[in-house]
Image: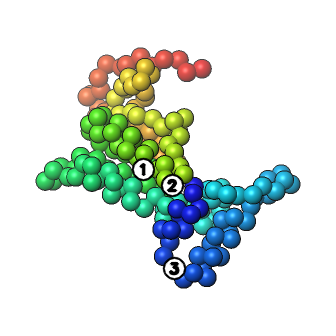
């Protein structure tokens, strides 16, 4: 995370901003080895989730601006806690466009979407996406989010590849 970008979004007395900048630049001691910190926030730091929320303020507005509600119909939702987020929509095209727009929006902050942590899936059905068969549902903040078929309504099972 770009420290200057983050500090530019914080509106507080200059003495507090100076203390925050010193905290960000304080460095990290990892297995007895000291490393300077020029970017990012300390992993596990008590203030890191707050700083992520400040840095990412506006991401939901970006997505909602691209796809505003149509009357009472919501086209897209973005749910975020600190630097973890999900984009939810019935339309695969909207999700793909949001992924691209968010990737561009993150660049000035010094962040990027981690492809190994990113999945596009359905909450009820198996789907094939990007050459892979994706299982229904996703994990978010320690919970598995998934729809279940009503008793007697289940489709014939879709074979799932062995993931040994």
| Residue 69 on image: x %, y % | 20, 52
Could one spot residue 51 in this view of the protein?
no
| CB under 8 Å between discs 1 and 3 | no
> Camera-side residue: 117 or 13?
13
The answer to which of marks 1 and 3 sits earlier in the sequence is 3
Extreme left residue here? Answer: 71
**Other-residue count near label 1 (Cα within 10 Å), few / some / many at <14 / 14–19 / ≥20:** some
Q: SS class of the residue under badge 3?
A: loop
Residue identified by numbered label 1? 105
Marker count (numbered):
3
| Residue 144 on image: x %, y % | 46, 42
Tell me what residue is drawn at x 62 percent, y 56 percent: 40
Q: SS class of the residue under badge 2?
A: helix
Tell me what residue is drawn at x 54 percent, y 51 percent: 110
Tell me what residue is drawn at x 51 percent, y 79 percent: 12
Could one spot residue 31 in this view of the protein?
yes
**Other-residue count near label 2 (Cα within 10 Å), few / some / many at <14 / 14–19 / ≥20:** some
Tell me what residue is drawn at x 39 percent, y 41 percent: 99
| CB under 8 Å between discs 1 and 2 | yes
Extreme right residue here? Answer: 32
| CB under 8 Å between discs 3 and 2 | no
Q: Which mark is residue 95?
A: none
| Residue 128 on image: x %, y % | 38, 23
**Other-residue count near label 3 (Cα within 10 Å), few / some / many at <14 / 14–19 / ≥20:** few
Q: What whole-number distance in Å separates the C-alpha atoms at marks 1 and 3?
A: 24 Å
Q: What whole-number distance in Å separates the C-alpha atoms at marks 1 and 2?
A: 8 Å
Q: SS class of the residue under badge 1?
A: helix
Q: What whole-number distance in Å separates the C-alpha atoms at marks 3 and 2?
A: 19 Å
Residue identified by numbered label 2? 109
> Camera-side residue: 53 or 148?
53
Residue identified by numbered label 3? 12
What's the image's color scheme? rainbow
């Amino acid at each position: 995370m770009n420290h200057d970008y983050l500090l530019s979004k914080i509106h507080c007395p200059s003495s507090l901003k100076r203390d925050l900048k010193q905290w960000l630049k304080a460095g990290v001691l990892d297995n007895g080895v000291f490393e300077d910190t020029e970017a990012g926030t300390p992993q596990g730091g008590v203030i890191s989730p707050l700083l992520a929320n400040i840095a990412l303020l506006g991401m939901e507005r970006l997505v909602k601006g691209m796809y505003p509600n149509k009357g009472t119909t919501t086209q897209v939702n973005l749910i975020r806690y600190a630097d973890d987020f999900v984009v939810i929509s019935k339309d695969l095209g909207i999700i793909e466009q949001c992924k691209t727009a968010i990737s561009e929006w993150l660049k000035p902050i010094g962040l990027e979407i981690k492809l190994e942590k990113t999945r596009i899936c359905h909450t009820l059905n198996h789907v094939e996406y990007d050459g892979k068969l994706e299982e229904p549902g996703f994990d978010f903040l320690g919970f598995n989010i998934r729809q279940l078929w009503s008793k007697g309504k289940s489709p014939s099972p879709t074979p799932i590849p062995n993931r040994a």
